[in-house]
Image: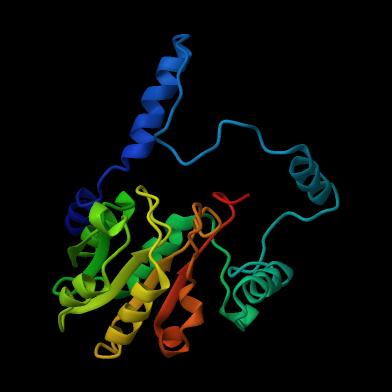
Amino acid sequence: MLKTIAAFDRIGEENAFAVLARANALVAQGRDIINLGIGQPDFRTPDFIVEAAVKALREGHHGYTPATGIPPLREAVAEDLHKRFNVEVSPDSVMIMPGGKPTMFMSILMFGEPGAEILYPDPGFPIYRSMIEFTGAKPVPVPIREENGFAFSAAETLKLITPKTRLLIVNSPANPTGGVTPKSEVDKLVAGLAKWPDVAIMSDEIYDHMVYDGETHVCLLNYPEIRDRLILLNGWSKTY
């Protein structure tokens, strides 16, 4: 019990939800608040999506599902990845999760333990660091610098890898900076990772549709040399 309590003491608070609670309290007081602290639009879900959900419930599509998600949905995800990135992904390799955080948590939990090191982008989504600390692993920040257009530097990232490194977390397009890492930099990172075959990669690509000013998203599924140690995180909430 004491070890469990100590572990939970290492979990930090996600500031976005602290800000949300404060914003909701002010709204309840009658204040007019624009909350920029949570990744959620200020318009309601479109009617056709609401109606599709209601229709599915009425037709009996509820109750328990396979732990990895229903097969038609996993097949649709694999098809979408093929259509957008021209990559072959088996539906058997797709897992549907209730949000991005469980994917992060399970990935970090697989590789994190005392004595291990996990690299994460800084600034970045606060859950990365808090989950790493929860496992007892050492969080190693990868600086995301304005002079690089808020893209990660492959050279700087690779210099931080040691024999203790178990997992590298990358995020492009990035949260909270919006930086998009160019293909040339991703190429350098993947080439450098050949020296570290035991380092897994979790690529958080949940903002992959949100690219502007002529930028192009680079999906790490396009690099077959790291496919056997790549975890791709994506989802519906930001895009749809």
- In front: 148, or 195? 148
Residue for point 59% across, 70% down: 68
The x, y position of residue 193, in whole percent, is: 29, 84
Residue for point 31% across, 55% down: 150
In the rendered view, would you say 99 is above or below 183?
above
The x, y position of residue 29, in whole percent, is: 44, 10
Quarter of the image where the N terminus is located: bottom left
- In front: 112, or 168? 168
- In front: 240, or 214? 214
Name the residue at the front extreme. Answer: 214
Residue for point 28% across, 87% down: 198
Name the residue at the top extreme. Answer: 30
Asked if residue 185 lies left or right of residue 32, the reply is left
Asked if residue 207 lies left or right of residue 23, the reply is right
Asked whether residue 50 is in view, the answer is: yes
Q: Quadrant of residue 80?
A: bottom right
